[in-house]
Amino acid sequence: MNAAVEPAAIAIAGLNKRFGQLSVLRDLDLTIADREFVCILGPSGSGKSTLLNIISGLEGGYTGTVQLGATRVGYLFQEPRLLPWLTAEKNVDFALDSCAVPESRRAELKDHYFELAGLAAFRGFYPHELSGGMRQRVSLVRALCVEPGILLMDEPFGGLDELTARRLRIDLLRIWRESRKTIVFVTHNAYEASYLADRVVVMARGRIRDQIKVTVPRPRDYDDPAVFDVNRDVVRRFLAAADVAEPAVPESDPALNPPGGKP
Ligand SMILES: Nc1ncnc2c1ncn2[C@@H]1O[C@H](COP(=O)(O)OP(=O)(O)O)[C@@H](O)[C@H]1O
Ligand SMILES: [Mg+2]
């Protein structure tokens, strides 16, 4: 008998999305395994957020197929999007209410995830009393408490200073080891992708241009030279993909297009 095949968490085939004349996603195929940590790396405007929005169901009007192996999808954005008039804990309760998580399970989930996120002592704090990094931790707790099978993260640490972001990346991997969600994490930071991912998917101009499997063993050390090696490879392949996708000479650059040059 064949070994059991893990069902895919996300199976996308022939995905095309346009906004008017603009073709934002083009013939995109992507299969993500259950519990896989995939980073999508691409320059601004390459269609990363649109892809996450389609996976989450927020964006429609596409052609192709998107199949999910989980019914509940969590979504984290660059801004924590907390309700300012509610405490950290009440913000989490608000999400639990909307997902009808049974009362019996709530206390246990909140204790677990607030503790994991290092926020046990801050449950009663309001968003304005917390630092940017801590606010983003609360939004992570909120996303995890509703027990999503799939967690989508759109540049979640992009608005934080580098040291805070580094701490959150390290903690995210620790939390992921314990919760084992399928994660799709969008970033334009190659090192972040190399450190976090099982697989880095390089996007440019609405297409997947390259994919790099990251085999650095886990748990990973943030400063492991092996991660630096992966980063170097990822950057090289990312630049190669971007070069193919972008015009070689930007027309607006006078240094490259001198006024007296050929028309
Ligand atoms: N709702 C929208 N209406 C029209 N154009 C959009 C809309 N959302 C995104 N776009 C365009 O689609 C392209 C891809 O956007 P996006 O998915 O946000 O890219 P990324 O997240 O990689 O920066 C961009 O050119 C953007 O301007
Ligand atoms: Mg985006």
Image (cartoon, rainbow, N blue to C red):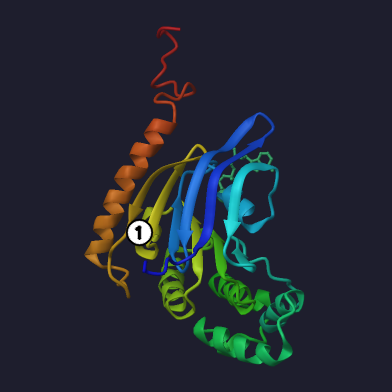
Q: Position of residue 193 (x, y in %)?
A: 40, 58
How far across and down, in percent of the image, does residue 243 sit? 38, 33
Judge: label 1 CB < 8 Å from ligand 1.
no
Q: Is residue 53 left or right of residue 227?
A: right
At label 1, counting other C-alpha atoms closer than 10 Å, the crowd grade (few under 14, some 14-19, many 20 or more) is many
Vertical relation: 199 (above or below) 170: above
Q: Residue at x 56, y 62 (%)?
A: 152
The spot of residue 183 in percent (x, y) is 50, 65
For the residue pair 138 and 160, the one nearer the viewer reads as: 138
In the image, what residue occupies the spot 44% across and 65% down? 36
Q: Is residue 215 above or below residue 65?
A: below
Residue 146 percent across, percent down from the top left: 64, 76
User: Can you tell me which quadrant of the image ligand 1 is in?
Assistant: top right
Q: For this view, does 138 lie left or right of residue 8? A: right
Res. 134 image quadrant: bottom right
Q: In which quarter of the image is residue 2?
A: bottom left
Residue at the (40%, 37%) spot, across then down: 242
Quadrant including the C terminus? top left
Residue 206, can we see it? yes
Number of marks drawn: 1
- Can I make out residue 49 in this image? no
Q: In this view, does 92 lie to the left or right of 46?
A: right
**In the displayed structure, would residue 241 be above or below residue 174?**
above
* Residue placed under numbered mark 1 in the picture: 194
Q: Nearer the viewer, residue 141 or 6?
A: 6
Q: What residue type is labelled 1?
A: Ser
